[in-house]
Image (cartoon, grey):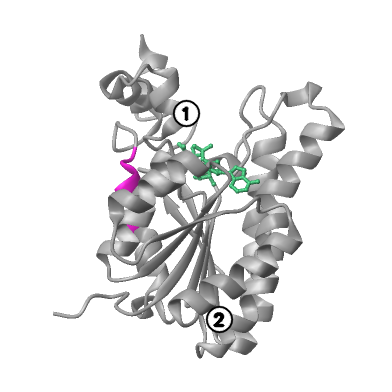
Amino acid sequence: MSKELDGKSVLLTGGATLFGAAVARSLNEAGANVAIVDIDAEAGIRVAQEIGGSTRFYLIDITSDYALEKLVGEVSDAFGGINAVVNLACSYADSGAESTREEWTTALNVNVVSMARLGFYARPHLAAAGGGAVVNLTSISANVAQTGRWTYPVSKAAIVQLTRNMALDYAADSIRVNSVSPGWTWSAIMNTLSNGNREKTDSVASPFHLTKRVADPREVAEVIVFLCSDRASIVTGADWAADGGYSAMGPEQAVPAIPLLME
Ligand SMILES: NC(=O)c1ccc[n+]([C@@H]2O[C@H](COP(=O)([O-])OP(=O)(O)OC[C@H]3O[C@@H](n4cnc5c(N)ncnc54)[C@H](O)[C@@H]3O)[C@@H](O)[C@H]2O)c1
């Protein structure tokens, strides 16, 4: 039976981390040849080896235009073209209201500018393949204020707009561009901060996700695979919530507030 990404090649940034590795695995299971791009060589090589098959690792700093231009040529040569790009790499450098110019510049450079520049270099390859897909990872942080966080949420909000701009201009080459906004997702940072305690992480996330838990990265990967595939042929310029209902919930959370008036 044919799979939804059979014969397609997908370039994935940030594929070395726990979340990115799950996305790489799902893309591979959907039949894609996956190029994992990251600055973490040790983890990137390990993930590519674990997934196996045609998966390749590329040690690249996405803030280098020179490296990005070289990268798309190499991936295209290795896989006979590029059909989709998934922009997952990010920087969490953020000191909130005290963020320095350097932190602002880093967050915007890694999270926003690098997506735009990779899109620029990948576009001719996607167009040459008859069109394709770009998926940009943003976050629930794009739409709400979170105490102590400035540079990251601002960069993620910019990605929602960048996605619309890319979708509009790339449509001429039959390239669809969408973003995905996860809520809390089991990832390297949560693994580290909770000391690997997923149950505790779920219970902290419970009051502000309708699903009462963090997402598994593979659940978010399902949405990414769909958006990369031809099944999403009518979908472009959209932001997809993959957030367990975080963005549907208001400040009252899932607690009846009106009865409090009668207490
Ligand atoms: N973890 C969550 O709960 C969550 C929630 C919402 C959105 N997201 C989004 O999902 C994505 C992954 O998040 P994560 O928590 O797994 O992040 P992470 O920090 O664990 O992983 C980011 C990856 O990007 C790589 N990277 C960083 N700078 C790079 C550069 N200059 N060049 C190449 N690679 C670089 C890192 O080495 C790392 O492998 C991000 O876009 C993030 O905004 C995560």
Q: Residues within 10 Å of mark 1 (few under 14, many from 20)?
A: some
Q: Is mark 2 within 8 Å of ligand 1?
A: no
Residue situated furthest right in the rendering: 101
Task: Please name the residue shown 42% across and 27% down the image.
Answer: 190
On screen, 235 above or below 63? below
On screen, 99 above or below 138? above
Three-letter amino acid code at the position of disc 1: Ile
Instruction: Check disc 2 and report its element: helix, strand or loop.
Output: helix
Q: Which residue, given by chain and number where applicable, does mark 1 sit on?
A: 189
Q: Is residue 121 left or right of residue 191?
A: right
Closer-to-camera residue (33/256): 33
Residue 65 drawn at (x, y percent): 75, 61
Task: Please name the residue shown 69% across and 60% down the image.
Answer: 67
Can residue 110 be seen here? The reply is yes
Instruction: Check disc 1 and report its element: helix, strand or loop.
Output: helix
Residue situated furthest left in the rendering: 1
Closer-to-camera residue (66/63): 66
Marks 2 and 1 sit apart, C-alpha to C-alpha, by 32 Å
Q: Is residue 132 left or right of residue 156?
A: left
The stretch of residues the image draws in magenta is: 215-222
Q: Is mark 1 within 8 Å of ligand 1?
A: yes
Q: Which quadrant, please, contains the N terminus?
A: bottom left
Snapshot quadrant of residue 66: bottom right
Along the polypeptide, which appears first: circle 2 or circle 1?
2
Q: Which residue, given by chain and number where applicable, does mark 2 sit on?
A: 126
Q: Which quadrant, please, contains the C terminus?
A: top left
